[in-house]
Image (cartoon, helix red, strand yellow):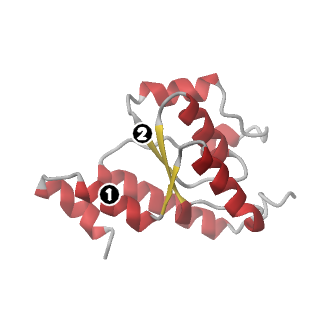
Amino acid sequence: MNRADSLEKGALEGVLGSGAALSAAGNFPILDLRHDRSSGAPFLADADLMSRITLMGRNGLVICGGLLDGAVTQISLAALMDGIDVFVCVDLTLSAEPDKTDLFLSRISTCGGHTMSYRQIVLELLSGERDEAKRAPLEALLL
């Protein structure tokens, strides 16, 4: 069993649940990559994945719920190269090598990505939303 596989399942489920709640409250799509790992092959931000992201028709991505050591960094860098704004929710990511977290986040930031907390992301989404009905679910995330 490698270090990534030994991450506590409860921690991963908690991160994924919070990411799904953010997606639902912000009314934006979620791209769930868990099924892509069924083969056990290493994760790659390949052309198929980038096409799926492009088909979502968004100019920005909020990335959470994955490993900084792999999917989060790979998707972030690939999306940045494709001209997509990237926001990594640092407290909703995990690492099999926690001592290298700063290295991964620095790489993303150096390439133009934004590393933010869950609270910062919610507050920024709120700052751009004027519709009270759409604000309520986001405000509930701050309680």
Q: Residue at x 39, y 34 (%)?
A: 59
Q: Is residue 87 left or right of residue 94?
A: left
Q: What amino acid type is highlighted by mark number 1? A: Glu
> For this rendering, which residue is in front, 77 or 31?
77
Quadrant of the image occupied by residue 137: bottom left
Mark 1 falls on what kind of element?
Answer: helix
Residue 52: percent from left, percent from top: 51, 27
Quadrant of the image occupied by residue 9: bottom right
Residue 18: percent from left, percent from top: 46, 63
Residue 26: percent from left, percent from top: 31, 52
Q: What amino acid type is highlighted by mark number 2? A: Gly
Image quarter (top left, top right, bottom left or bottom right) of the C terminus = bottom left
Residue 42: percent from left, percent from top: 78, 40
How many numbered marks does the figure carry? 2
- Report how far apart the C-alphas of labels 2 and 1 lie in the structure: 13 Å
| Residue 108 appears in the picture as rendered | yes
Mark 2 falls on what kind of element?
Answer: strand
Name the residue furthest right.
1
Q: Marks 1 and 2: in contact by CB < 8 Å?
A: no
Give the mark nearest the N terminus, 2 or 1. Answer: 2
As drawn, 22 above or below 58: below
> For this rendering, which residue is in front, 35 or 74?
74
As drawn, 33 above or below 134: above
- The residue pinned by badge 1 equals 124
> For this rendering, which residue is in front, 108 or 59?
108
Q: Is residue 6 left or right of residue 137?
A: right
Q: Residue at x 45, y 42 (%)?
A: 61
Q: Residues within 10 Å of mark 1 (few under 14, many from 20)?
A: few
**What numbered label is drawn on residue 60?**
2
Q: Is residue 41 left or right of residue 71?
A: right
Image quarter (top left, top right, bottom left or bottom right) of the N terminus = bottom right
